[in-house]
Image: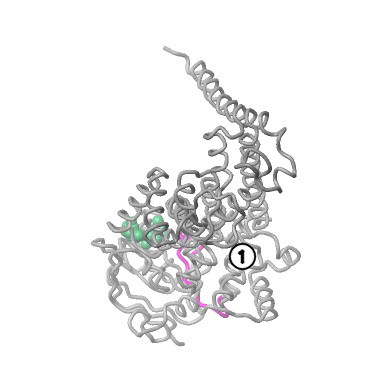
């Protein structure tokens, strides 16, 4: 017989070890990039244009590109995603059709991004003649992140206590009023988490962006211009062996901005929750 | 005295399950009605069919009549949202929204698209006063309702309901999560509310039914076994089954 106290100690140790290991890897990766890149990042690097294909100069256009592309993709995907989630959870009865839609969303979520890239290239870039552009890129990215937004929103909506809906209906609210005034506000933290997750994926994506938004290093003037994002810039710098320094510096900016986004959304969430309950 | 609610041969099915069997009941105006009976006999179901909350459940079929002021709520084209404002409900668990105290009480007014800020504040105040909460809460209307103790929350839920000025208040075991003192407070409030409202309360607490109600119905397995004046039910039950239940010889 093994002493349950003993197995308990072992279990705690193993779990703690797993946690420690995960954290260590995370810290190592971030530390590695920062140690190689941080020295080459300064205001100039952030605010000036690249020269000589990125061997010299800064990354200003790619920052703008990243910002526009990811924001736009979220702006396109969020209304459709949240709308679909509301429709599936509140307006339809659980049935074959809803299960098929859900299964479809799950399948979409599992498709490699390069397939989305190829689809975007064939559909938006060539067939619709939108060429390599911000518009093609953000539409394709929106398709890519849509399933995540749908499923996370759905989970968030489902976790709103049923009693809240009952109360709302019993006070004479319509389904739409209930959704707007009770369900969505309560589901918001969960929905935002999904959106932040998707934002991160958009920012980090390379395959889709290269296929659909191109890799122009010019600062875009309209939605029909091609752009390059930081991720793509990093990829090209590293792959073509143009400049290791600049590559790591770009990665550093990328990592810091993603960390910043996470921190800000975390802060917003806490403020939001304490505002509602405090 | 006028009949506020008259239920005639009401049958309700959850899919195949026959949950209410030809229930009849007459509620006179400005009375408190108590529904008692063992768990699962259909008290909540009956209550929820008076404001059509059962419509929200899949597979529910209803026949028979529920007359409110002489008008059938199921078949006369009565607007379901208006009905639910006239016939409000207090639930078993205090379910305040994760909003401020003020917004909780104002919820029904917002839903009804009342825009006049002054009017809203007035109604919130009156409702909180009637619910006996104004003096305790008037200085912290902006704080979250979830921070209130349970017994305050349940009264807040009643205030939230009073704000839409219902004619009938349905209460489904409103005191089952409260301690005796809080329960007493709610009962005192019910007696007060009775002057203006009609109250139907489901309770497992026989003393409570005896204390507060004017009329009482005993239900068993979907049947309304006996419906009569409370004093009659408790001192002189006509049906053997009622007698067994109130004397605690049940099951
Ligand atoms: N949504 C539902 N679907 C199917 N059956 C249901 C549903 N709600 C209630 N029932 C059944 O209907 C019967 C009456 O339920 P109801 O909740 O009205 O009883 P109750 O008298 O309020 O019981 P309790 O005292 O436990 O609250 C029970 O047998 C219950 O299992
Ligand atoms: Mg019940």
Q: Residue A275: x percent and y percent?
A: 68, 57
Snapshot quadrant of residue B96: bottom right
Q: Residue B112: x percent and y percent?
A: 55, 78
Q: With respect to residue B16, does B120 lie above or below?
A: below
**Looking at the image, which is closer to me, A91 or B69?**
A91
Q: Which residue is mark 1?
A: B156
Q: Residue B210: x percent and y percent?
A: 49, 65
- Report the residue at 45% width, 50% height from top: A148
Snapshot quadrant of residue B202: bottom left
**Subunit bearing disc 1:** B
Is residue B41 among what the camera can see? no
Q: Which residues are magenta?
A: B194-210
Q: With respect to residue B211, does A108 lie above or below?
A: above
Q: Is residue B222 left or right of residue A134?
A: left
* Membership of B238 in magenta stretch: no
Q: With respect to residue B175, does B166 lie above or below?
A: below
Count of residue discs? 1
Q: Is the N terminus of chain A in the top left, top right, bottom left or bottom right quadrant?
A: top left
Q: With respect to residue A247, does A66 lie above or below?
A: below
Q: Residue furthest top?
A: A1
Q: Is residue B194 left or right of residue A176?
A: right
- Report the residue at 42% width, 52% height from top: A147
- Report the residue at 44% width, 13% height from top: A2
**Looking at the image, which is closer to me, A127 or B249?**
A127
């Amino acid at each position: 017989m093994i002493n349950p106290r003993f197995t308990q100690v072992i279990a705690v140790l193993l779990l703690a070890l797993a946690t420690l290991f995960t954290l260590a890897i995370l810290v190592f990766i971030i530390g590695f990039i920062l140690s190689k890149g941080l020295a080459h990042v300064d205001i100039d690097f952030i605010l000036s244009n690249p020269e000589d294909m990125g061997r010299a100069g800064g990354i200003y256009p790619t920052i703008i590109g990243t910002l526009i592309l990811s924001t736009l993709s979220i702006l396109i995907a969020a209304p459709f995603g949240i709308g679909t989630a509301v429709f599936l959870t509140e307006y339809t009865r659980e049935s074959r059709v809803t299960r098929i839609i859900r299964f479809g969303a799950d399948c979409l979520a599992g498709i490699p991004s390069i397939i989305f890239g190829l689809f975007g290239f064939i559909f938006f870039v060539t067939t619709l003649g939108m060429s390599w552009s911000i518009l093609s890129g953000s539409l394709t990215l929106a398709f890519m992140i849509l399933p995540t937004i749908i499923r996370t929103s759905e989970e968030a909506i489902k976790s709103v206590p049923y009693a809240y809906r009952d109360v709302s209906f019993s006070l004479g609210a319509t389904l739409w009023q209930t959704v707007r005034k009770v369900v969505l506000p309560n589901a918001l933290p969960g929905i935002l988490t999904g959106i932040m997750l998707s934002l991160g994926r958009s920012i980090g994506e390379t395959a889709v962006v290269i296929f659909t938004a191109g890799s122009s290093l010019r600062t875009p003037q309209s939605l029909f211009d091609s752009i390059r994002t930081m991720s793509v810039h990093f990829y090209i710098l590293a792959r073509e062996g143009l400049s290791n320094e600049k590559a790591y510096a770009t990665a550093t900016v990328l990592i810091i901005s993603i960390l910043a986004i996470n921190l800000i959304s975390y802060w917003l969430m806490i403020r939001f929750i304490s505002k509602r309950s405090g | 005295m006028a009949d506020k609610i008259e239920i005639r041969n009401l049958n309700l099915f959850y899919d195949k399950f026959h949950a209410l069997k030809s229930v009849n009941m007459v509620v006179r105006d400005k009375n408190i009605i108590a529904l008692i009976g063992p768990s699962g006999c259909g008290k909540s179901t009956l209550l929820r069919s008076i404001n059509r909350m059962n419509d929200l459940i899949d597979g529910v079929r209803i026949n028979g009549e529920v007359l409110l002021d002489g008008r059938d709520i199921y078949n006369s084209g009565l607007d379901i949202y208006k009905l639910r404002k006239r016939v409000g409900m207090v639930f078993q668990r205090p379910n305040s929204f994760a909003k401020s105290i003020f917004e909780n009480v104002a919820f029904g007014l917002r839903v009804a698209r009342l825009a006049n800020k002054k009017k809203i504040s007035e109604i919130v105040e009156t409702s909180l006063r009637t619910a006996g909460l104004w003096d305790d809460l008037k200085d912290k209307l902006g704080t979250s309702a979830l921070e209130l103790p349970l017994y305050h929350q349940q009264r807040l839920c009643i205030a939230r309901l009073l704000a839409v000025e219902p004619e009938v208040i349905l209460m489904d075991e409103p005191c089952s999560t409260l301690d005796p003192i809080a329960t007493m407070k709610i009962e005192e409030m019910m007696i007060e509310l009775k002057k203006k409202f009609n109250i139907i309360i489901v309770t497992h607490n026989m003393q409570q039914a005896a204390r507060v109600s004017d009329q009482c119905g005993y239900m068993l397995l979907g049947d309304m076994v006996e419906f009569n004046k409370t004093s009659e039910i408790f001192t002189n039950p006509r049906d053997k089954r009622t007698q067994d239940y109130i004397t605690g010889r049940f099951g």
